Amino acid sequence: MIAGDRVRVETFVRVPLADAFEVFTLEIDQWWRRGPAYRVGGKRPGTLHLESRLGGRIFEEYDEGRLHEIGTITIWDPPAHFAFTWRGINFAPTEVTTVEVWFAASGEGTRVTLEHRGFAALPDGHPARHGKPVDAFVRDMGMWWGGLLTSLRERSEDR
Amino acid sequence: MDLRTRAGLSTVDATLGALADPTRRGVVDLLRKRPRRAGEIAEHLGLTRPAMSRHLRVLRTSGLIEPASDDADARAKIYRLRPEPFGELRSWLEDVERFWTLELGAFKAHAERTRKK
């Protein structure tokens, strides 16, 4: 689902909640896809590491100890919830986005929801925010974008 | 990890940056309905001429709006919305969505192979 400046994706896994959280975080290197589109190392894929604590780093290690730091953990609430900052390999230093992941027991397994957002986020103190907290600002932007993109899509489909 | 595929984050940034200002979002909202003259936009939004020019300049520089001539009055300049930047933003977000859908698919496959109840 795309809403404004955020993207939300969900999946259901047939494993218990604690296992789902553990696999997602501790075994990230085992399931994260390999190849140049997904790993910095490209042909010689690096190893993904996630330091499982608040402030811990998520990074890829490739070519004898070279590192690409993807981001750091900003929320750590196992086994229900965690979040980390996300910087792509070619993002400018100010281009930081957030990935947040929730785990909820559901029926015979666990529902996992992932949200990547903050593409519209501005640096602290930017006048455009009008003193609003980040969340309210991004939420407003998101609603506004949602409406705008829908109407533009409808308009382009009419053509 | 490269999510800057089709549109490039810098283009998307310019779009989002221009629209971070509520007055400029107001201008875009007005132009969604139909193209308008600068004076008409200023009146709707209660803006002074210099403030109006400044906002229109930012929107033009970032490619969100473009000037055109008014069919009814060839001497008058009107502004209209350019859909391209919005399309680029949309396709970039679609790339991000596809990226995470595939990653979660890989996660599910691995978790169910190794930990299934």
Image (cartoon, coloured by chain):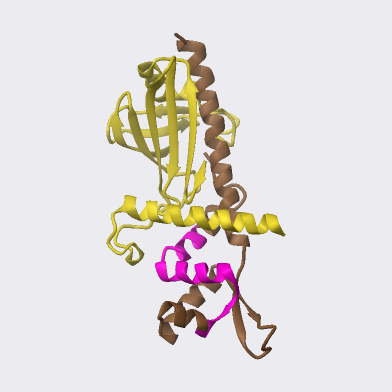
The extreme right residue here reads A159
Q: Does residue A8 show up magenta in the picture?
A: no
Q: Main secondary structure of the magenta part?
A: helix
Q: Residue at x 52, y 35 (%)?
A: B100
Q: Is residue B64 visible?
A: no
Q: Nearer the viewer, residue A1 or A115?
A: A1
Quadrant (top left, top right, bottom left, bottom right) of the C terminus of chain B: top left
Residue B105 image offset from top left, x and y in percent: 55, 26
Give the quadrant of residue A155.
bottom right
Residue A13 image offset from top left, x and y in percent: 48, 20
Q: Which chain is yellow?
A: A
Q: Residue at x 62, y 88 (%)?
A: B76
Give the quadrant of residue A159.
bottom right
Q: Does residue B36 show up magenta in the picture?
A: yes
- Is A80 on the left-hand or right-hand side of A14? left
> In the picture shown, does residue A148 fall above or below A50?
below
Residue A27 image offset from top left, x and y in percent: 43, 21
Residue A73 image offset from top left, x and y in percent: 33, 36
Q: Residue at x 44, y 52 (%)?
A: A142
Q: Residue at x 47, y 10 (%)?
A: B116
Count of picture labels: 0
Q: Is residue B90 visible?
A: yes
The extreme bottom residue here reads B75
Query: What colour do you see for chain B?
Result: brown
In magenta, the rendered stretch is: B13-39
> In the picture shown, does residue B94 fall above or below A30?
below
> In the picture shown, does residue B68 fall above or below A34?
below
